[in-house]
Image (cartoon, rainbow, N blue to C red):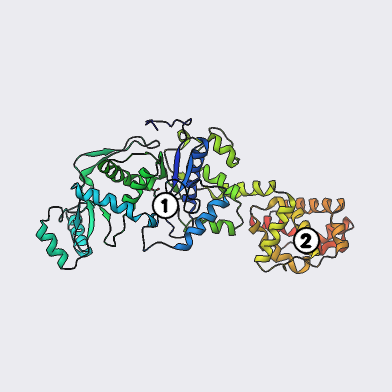
Amino acid sequence: MTKVESHLDYSTPLRMRYAPSPTGQTHVGGVRTALFNYLLARRTGGAFVLRVEDTDESRYRPESEATMMRDLRWFGLSWDEGPDAGGPYGPYRQSARHDIYDKYARQLLQNNQAYWCYCTPEELEADREAQRARGIQAPRYSGRCRNLSAQESAALQTEGRPKSLRFIVPPGETTVHDLIKGEPHFDHHQIGDFVIVKSTGGPTYNFAAAVDDALMNIDVVLRGDEHLSNTPVQLMLLRALGLREPLYAHVPLILNEDQSKLSKRHNTVGVDEYRKEGVLASALLNHLVLLGWSPGDEREDFTLDELSKMFSLERVHKSAAVYNAARLRAFNQRELRKLPREELSKMLASAMQENGLLENPAPDAAIHWIDTFLDAYGEELHTIADAIPIVKSLRDEAIVIPAIELERLRSREVLFFLDSVSQYVASLSELRGLPLNKTIPAIGEEFGLKKKMRIMQCAWRSQVRKVARR
Ligand code: GLU
């Protein structure tokens, strides 16, 4: 691919990659990165590559790789190459690529672009401390082992010290050509000789990622903002190794409403938690795509296919996006309303079953009840999980509604009644002290509905709650 400074050539198939480290639950920020990569791959008829970055042995959680794949599939983000799918540039799990990293590490060592470092963690910490004391805010490696003689190295090795391989940062600066950020410069003076092979023998993230992006022929490395400072480091490695350089695109962060980095202290961040809260993949996807990208008009409702035709980096914002929980709930309500009733009923039934509110399989009477419930509440729900507390407050009386009553509930008079109750309750500004338990059945009586009042509670309670919340 030819290098384009400010915009991409969307007529050329792009090889894009999502490279998660499976260290825990799938974070929505990661999903947004995966989504943007997927969309560019699909828009250009290129390839979406899934690469598992499992080189940090202490943080790797094998089960989270399967969870991450399940979560991507839930959103419909299918990959063309990956650990399970295979592909021409495998293996796609970094732990299976050690011989490749070893080869490039040897090359750097032989070309005097890297050296063995025997510093202990205590020595490194003491160096950093001394630099901080001198007012250096971002301490860097002192270079102590850069010029060790062969005898000195041998002596340190005999002491049994662990060794790591450091890259020799050349003088000068690196300019990153970033499709979103422009051209930030990085002065090498600020960057100490960095580790590329850890004392465990494994590659560091920067080393493995740089080598893999080149060998996997990745055209654009699109990832979160927090990796921008890794980019000069990765570019230095690629240049030293004579490997192909990708283009870069760093997507602005997602922030909590108080401008701090999106975190679980303020918002739900795990995909699994969203699913448990009853959020639909389509709502979350629309929400995520609009965090950092805009279609250029007011539209907020897209399918993955539509996005795959229209997504472009030019419309990715340069500044951070603020997470908007209310918008997600509104989107989810919209998506719930689009669902066929049968599907909604099934979702509610299974949410009730998960909460121990319904037997499995559900008896016919309960299916009818769910239908009635959805008539009364369906439009109001922002998530299926919203229904659970309401169901809880109603279930004792409601689940045993005889079929004949259910038929009556569907009558026009009931609708009028509910409407009147809604209007009556909504017109109240203060509930305390009002004899609602008497007033509402009295309205019911006016409509000749006395007998059905027990069932009616299901509908008017929500109105009462709304007023109470005001
Ligand atoms: N494994 C890194 C992460 O999960 C990926 C960074 C990158 O895309 O280069 O943050």
**What percent of the width, then of the height, locates residue 46?**
49, 38
Name the element at disc 2: helix
In the depicted view, which residue is nearer to us: 454 or 446?
454
Furthest residue in direction right, as rendered = 448
Q: Give the Cα separation between the discs numbered 2 and 1.
A: 49 Å
Q: Is mark 1 within 8 Å of ligand 1?
A: no
Q: Is mark 2 within 8 Å of ligand 1?
A: no
* Left or right: residue 56 compared with residue 146: right
Which dot, 2 or 1, sits closer to the camera?
Answer: 1
**What percent of the width, then of the height, locates residue 296?**
53, 32
- Identify residue type, mark 2: Ile
* Left or right: residue 172 compared with residue 224: left
Q: How many marks?
A: 2
Q: Earlier in the sequence, mark 2 or mark 1?
A: 1
Location of the C terminus by quadrant is bottom right
In the depicted view, which residue is nearer to us: 270 or 245?
245
Relative vertical location of residue 171 with respect to residue 156 in this rendering, above or below: above
Relative vertical location of residue 173 with respect to residue 127 in this rendering, above or below: above
In the depicted view, which residue is nearer to us: 414 or 285?
285
In the depicted view, which residue is nearer to us: 376 or 74?
74
Q: Which mark is residue 154?
A: none
Q: Count neighbours of disc 1 (C-alpha within 10 A) and say few if under 14, some if 14 to 19, many if 20 or more.
A: some
* Left or right: residue 216 compared with residue 109: right
Is residue 114 visible to the viewer in this orientation of the structure?
yes
Q: Which mark is residue 91?
A: 1
Residue to which mark 2 is pinned: 367
- Identify residue type, mark 1: Pro
